[in-house]
Image (tube, grey):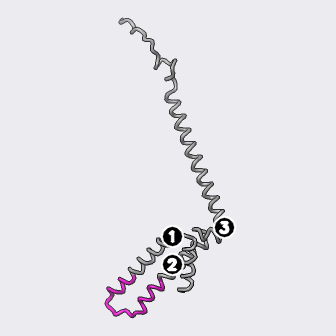
Amino acid sequence: QLTLTTTLDGAIVGSRDFTWIVACGTCTCLAQLAALRAIAVSNFAAPISLVFATFAARLLVYFLASGSRVALGYGPLGRALRPALAAKRQQRNDDRRRLRQQRQQQKRRQGDDDTTSATLGKGENSPATSTTTTPPPPPE
């Protein structure tokens, strides 16, 4: 297990996926610390093998999470090993981005149309902006 985890970790380091390494390493470390705290506050004397078991569990979780990420084509290493899957995902993201931009443009056009219809009749020659004044009607 340690050999496989070290190999995978080295490959991820080589692909410069430091964000994943730090995030996953921190989460697995916190989980191990929580397990060790639970062992420490328990009433029975825990054998040293239980402490090593928490380390093995930490490595296993890291290996499974990182291996799944690579197998699914995420991260630099996953994109290198699964280019077809990564390209399909990129195309889907591009389509979503394009659709979102089209919706935003439609909303802007609708907003412009609403503004135009609200200001209709307030042009230079409209009565609302006319500079000529008419006398008030005579009182009756």
Eye-nearest disc, 2 or 1: 1
Distance (Cα) linking label 3 and label 1: 20 Å
Asked if residue 102 is positioned above or below residue 11 in the image, the reply reads above
Task: Indicate which disc, 3 or 1, sits on the residue closer to the N terminus.
Answer: 1
What residue does disc 1 label? 18
Q: Residues within 10 Å of mark 2 (few under 14, many from 20)?
A: many
Q: Residues within 10 Å of mark 3 (few under 14, many from 20)?
A: some
Q: Which residues are magenta?
A: 35-57
Asked if residue 109 is positioned above or below residue 20 in the image, the reply reads above
Amino acid under disc 2: Tyr
Residue at 47% across, 72% down: 22
Task: Indicate which disc, 2 or 3, sits on the residue closer to the N terminus.
Answer: 2
Residue at 43% across, 92% down: 49
What residue does disc 3 label? 83
Q: Is residue 45 magenta?
A: yes
Residue at 39% across, 80% down: 33
Amino acid under disc 1: Phe
Furthest residue in direction right, as rendered: 84
Dot 1 lies on which element?
helix
Is the stretch drawn in magenta largely helix, strand or loop? helix
Horizontal side, residue 34 vs residue 84: left or right: left
Distance (Cα) linking label 2 and label 1: 14 Å
What residue does disc 2 label? 62
Determine which quarter of the picture holds residue 45. bottom left
Horizontal side, residue 46 vs residue 107: left or right: left
**In the image, residue 79 lies at what x, y percent?**
62, 68
